[in-house]
Amino acid sequence: MSDGIFWKSVKRGFRRTCPHCGAGPLFDGWMTTRDQCPACGLVYERSAGDTWAFWIIGDRIPIAIAIAAVYFGVGPRSWIQGAMVIGAVLAVLVATIPQRMGLVIALDYLSRRWWPDPNDPLPSSVAAHGD
Ligand SMILES: [Zn+2]
């Protein structure tokens, strides 16, 4: 855990590449996740729903903050303005789906690295691809 793997994986996820090797793409198209890394064979998501906890953190919290900010900051006099702020936040959230999906996959990958599961072996270490 002291080898900077956290930031390396997060960076790779944000760049939409495999958190394990950094070489294979995470997506097939704009936001269709691949099942597996074509370069090292890492299975990105063992079973659907493994990453839901990370999704809640990544999705609900920014929306909740935006709504709270509008509620407490803008006030009831300018609900149209408030709706526009929430709309802008939602637009940003949608626009960054691939990046956030990459981060979620990277966090899931890290949790599997930190708490290894004998039934879920990660691909053996591969040659570093840059970074
Ligand atoms: Zn890979």
Image (cartoon, helix red, strand yellow):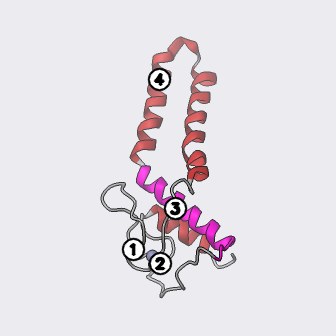
Mark nearest the camera among 2 and 4 is 2
Q: Residue 51 at what x, y percent from top left?
A: 56, 55
Residue at the bottom extreme, as displayed: 127
Ligand 1 within 8 Å of the CB at mark 1: yes
Tell me the amino acid under the disc marked 3. Answer: Ile
**Disc 2 versus disc 4: distance between alpha carbons?**
42 Å
Tell me the amino acid under the disc marked 4. Answer: Ala
Residue at numbered disc 3: 105
Helix, strand or loop for disc 2: loop
Q: Taking the image as four quarters, which one is ligand 1 found in? A: bottom left
Residue at the left extreme, as displayed: 29
Ligand 1 within 8 Å of the CB at mark 2: yes
- In this view, the residue in front, 41 or 24, is 41
Tell me the amino acid under the disc marked 2. Answer: Cys
Q: Is residue 98 magenta?
A: yes
**Disc 4 versus disc 1: distance between alpha carbons?**
39 Å
Does the CB distance between marks 3 and 4 fall below 8 Å? no
Q: Which residues are magenta?
A: 97-118
**Splitting the image into 4 quarters, where does residue 33 fall?**
bottom left
Residue at numbered disc 4: 83
Q: Is residue 41 above or below residue 73?
A: below
Helix, strand or loop for disc 3: helix
Tell me the amino acid under the disc marked 1. Answer: Gly
